[in-house]
Each structure stands twice: as C-alpha cells, then as structure tokens.
C-alpha cells in the first residue's frame, strides 16, 4: 500500500529527529570521555593536559566548569614538574572562581615549587579556611610547615589529614618520620601499632622505628621492631643486615626471627653432619693447617671445632650481611651442628684452655640467640626455595 504524502513527511521528520538525537548522544559520549581524561591527571598527565586544553576550547563551558578544568590542568602540569604552567592555570581558574579552595591550594603548591614559601603558606591558609575538612589541603599544610621548620605544628595538621584519610600512605610515613625527628617515640610506637592493626603489611613503619632505635644505639628496641619488617620481607638485604646488627648489640634480648622453622626438620647427628659437610665442600682446606684437606684434618677430633667455628662464622656473616646462597645456608646448618658437637666432645680437654678462650670470644660476639636466628633464617631460606 502506497503511503500518503503526509505520512511520508511525518516519517522523514521522525527519522531526522532520531538522527539528531543519535549524533547528540555520540557527541555527549565523546565530550564525557574528554572530561574523564582531563580529570585523570594522576594516571596520564600528558593526556590530561591535552584533554583539558580541548575542554577549554569549548565555547559553551560555563565558568565553574572552566575553573575546574584549569584546576585539573594545573595539577597535570604539576605532575610533569612544569610549575610555571601550573601557576598560570591556577591563577586563570582563580580569576573565574576566587574562593575555590583547591585552586588556591594548587597555586600554593606551584608557588612553593617555584621557591616562594611565604606566598604558598598564605594561599594554603586561605584554602584551608574555605575547606577545613580537606585531607589534601591539610596534608599540604603539614608539608609546608615542616619545610618551614615547624615540625610540631606540621605534625598536628598531618594527624588531622590522617583522621580524614587514614589509608593515605604518604601522610602515614610523614607522621612517623616527624614523630621520630621530635623524639616522640612513645607516640610513634602507638601509631605503628595502629597501622599494623589496620594493615599487617605496613611493616615499613616498624622498619623506620627500628632504624631510628638502631641509630640511637637502643639495640633491644631496634631488634624488636626490625624483626617485624624482616619477617615480612627477609629478602631485603639491607634490612636483614640492620636486624642482625641490632641482634648482636641486643644479645639475649634479640627476639626470634623464624622460630617456626626450628623444629621443621631434625638436626643432623655429629658424624652425619661431618660426612655431609665433606660431601658439600669436597675441596675444602683448613687454613690453619696450610694445604691440609678438611677430610684429613677432621679425622682428628681436636681439629673439628676450629674448622667448624671458622666456617660457621664465615657463613653466618654472609647470611646476615646480604650475600646468602643455598650452598652457604646448607653449610651453615652443618657447621652449626659441628660447633655444638665440639663443645661436648670428650677429646677437648687437651685443647681446653685455648678452646674456652676462643669460645668465650665467639659467644661474646654471636650470642646463642643471634646464632639461633641465623640458623632459622638458613632453614627459612632453603624452605622458600631460594
């Protein structure tokens, strides 16, 4: 059936209207994508700058939206360390919205980075007065005050920022550092405990406290905090070296590192340890005896202890100070056994005086708690499949 002229006309109008709607929707989707990219300056600053620039070319962008676009582009320029451009954008935005707290804070940041701390503090103070509950502005208040040498004041603002955004790691770390700098160790300990209660993996705070106590030569406290960080990441050579250094200073106060590995497997017997040591290091020589092989030297029970002690010491130092290997870990377990075997040997009276003197010096440096921890680390290292 042929459609009437009027019906065809109405249908054409409907199709044209639908086409306009579809084009408008597509254009709206495109503009929304540009706006999203402009706001996402922390993900891709260069893309954000381009997107914000595109938005600023839109003739129908209202002043509030234009001011916010300048704010986003200022932040993107800041992310690329172009602080002159960031300052210019912040000012352009403030010309449109003079009481915008985030724009004032962006101008404060740009002025600080360009060397004008006084103006930065003034802008930040105005921003905070306008938005006293902004964790971002409070965080920058703390940072600027700290830069100005007012650490105690800075700490108070950072604590407020932390209350508003407790998961912000930058604020957490700055708080711990400022507490340590101010010798407010009791507060730092409480703060570290609260962080670990929320996030058991936040042992960076334990490490900072441990390092601070180490520098203050409070080795028992240093070991107590560093052990948490080492248990979290035993592969960190610097951290592990600091912990064992604290343990040597703490002696009997050194806490256990991996006690759960202690009984994971039975210790080898004295004869078995000696046999396995010679299998593990067949080319071993005894330095005290020139070119005498370990196999020959260790046939004499009186030579077991000095060889075991020398190897035990060398392997302990290697495992403590950042150069662990599977070979050293395996050998440490054997030489630790031989060291213990030598102490109960009935053949030692002939060497008693010399043995006891060296043993006392050895034990003074490597307390049994230290030796146990290195041995535990060796077991853990092997169990971890290193």
Image (cartoon, rainbow, N blue to C red):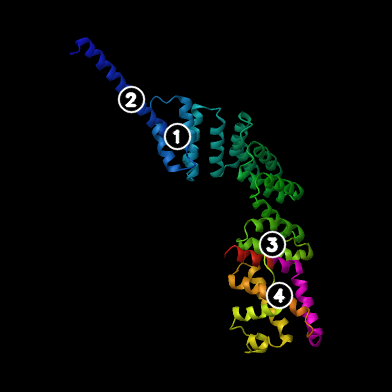
Q: What range is drawn magenta here?
A: 348-373
- Mark 1: few, some, or many residues within 10 Å (few <14, many ≥20)? some
Q: Nearer the viewer, mark 4 or mark 1?
A: 4
Q: Please state, as top left, top right, bottom left or bottom right, where the C terminus lies in the image.
A: bottom right
Of the numbered discs 4 and 3, the one sitting upstream in the chain is 3
Q: Residue at x 61, y 45 (%)?
A: 169
Q: Within the image, what quadrant is residue 27 found in? A: top left
Q: Nearer the viewer, mark 2 or mark 4?
A: 4
Dot label at residue 243: 3
| Residue 14 vs residue 96, the one in the foreground | 14
Looking at the image, tell me whether mark 3 or mark 1 is earlier in sequence order: 1
Q: Earlier in the sequence, mark 2 or mark 3?
A: 2
User: Which residue is denoted by mark 1 in the rendering?
Assistant: 36
Q: Is residue 73 above or below residue 366?
A: above
Label 2 to label 4: alpha-carbon separation: 81 Å
Mark 4 vs 1, N-terminal side? 1
Residue 260 vs 121, above or below: the answer is below
Q: Secondary structure at mark 1?
A: helix
Nearer the camera: disc 4 or disc 3:
4
| Residue that mark 2 sits on | 22
Q: Secondary structure at mark 3?
A: helix
Main secondary structure along the magenta-highlighted residues? helix
**Residues at marks 2 and 4 touching, judged by CB atoms closer than 8 Å:** no
Q: Residues within 10 Å of mark 3 (few under 14, many from 20)?
A: many
In front: label 2 or label 1:
2
Q: Secondary structure at mark 2?
A: helix
Circle 4 residue: 337
Q: Position of residue 75 (x, y in %)?
A: 50, 39
Q: Relative to residue 24, is residue 184 drawn left or right?
A: right
Find the distance from the CA under tag 4 to the CA under tag 3. Answer: 24 Å
């Amino acid at each position: 059936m042929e459609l009437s002229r009027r019906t065809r006309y109405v249908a054409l109008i409907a199709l044209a209207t639908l086409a306009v709607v579809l084009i408008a929707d597509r254009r709206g989707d495109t503009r929304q994508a540009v706006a999203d990219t402009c706001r996402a300056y922390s993900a891709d600053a260069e893309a954000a700058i381009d997107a914000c620039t595109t938005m600023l070319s839109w003739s129908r962008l209202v002043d509030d939206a234009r001011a916010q676009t300048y704010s986003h582009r200022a932040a993107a320029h800041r992310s690329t360390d172009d602080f002159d451009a960031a300052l210019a954008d912040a000012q352009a935005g403030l010309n449109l919205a003079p009481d915008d707290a985030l724009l004032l804070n962006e101008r404060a940041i740009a002025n600080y980075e360009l060397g004008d701390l006084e103006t930065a503090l003034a802008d930040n103070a105005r921003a905070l007065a306008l938005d006293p509950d902004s964790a971002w502005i409070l965080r920058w208040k703390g940072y600027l005050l700290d830069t100005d040498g007012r650490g105690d004041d800075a700490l108070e603002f950072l604590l407020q920022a932390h209350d508003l955004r407790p998961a912000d790691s930058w604020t957490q770390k700055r708080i711990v550092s400022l507490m340590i700098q101010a010798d407010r160790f009791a507060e730092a300990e409480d703060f570290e405990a609260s962080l670990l209660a929320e996030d058991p993996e936040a042992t960076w705070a334990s490490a900072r406290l441990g390092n601070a106590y180490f520098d203050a030569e409070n080795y028992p406290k240093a070991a107590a905090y560093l052990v948490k960080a080492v248990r979290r990441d035993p592969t960190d050579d610097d951290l592990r070296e600091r912990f064992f250094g604290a343990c040597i200073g703490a002696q009997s106060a050194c806490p256990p590192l991996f006690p759960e590995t202690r009984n994971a497997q039975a210790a080898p017997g004295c004869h078995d340890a000696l046999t396995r040591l010679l299998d593990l290091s067949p080319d071993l020589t005894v330095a005290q005896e020139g070119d005498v092989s370990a196999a020959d030297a260790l046939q004499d029970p009186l030579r077991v202890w000095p060889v075991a002690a020398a190897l035990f010491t060398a392997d302990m130092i290697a495992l403590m100070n950042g150069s662990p290997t599977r070979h050293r870990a395996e050998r440490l377990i054997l030489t630790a056994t031989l060291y213990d075997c030598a102490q109960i040997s009935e053949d030692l009276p002939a060497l008693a005086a010399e043995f006891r003197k060296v043993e006392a010096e050895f034990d003074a440096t490597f307390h049994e708690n230290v030796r146990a921890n290195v041995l535990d680390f060796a077991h853990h290292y092997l169990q971890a499949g290193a």
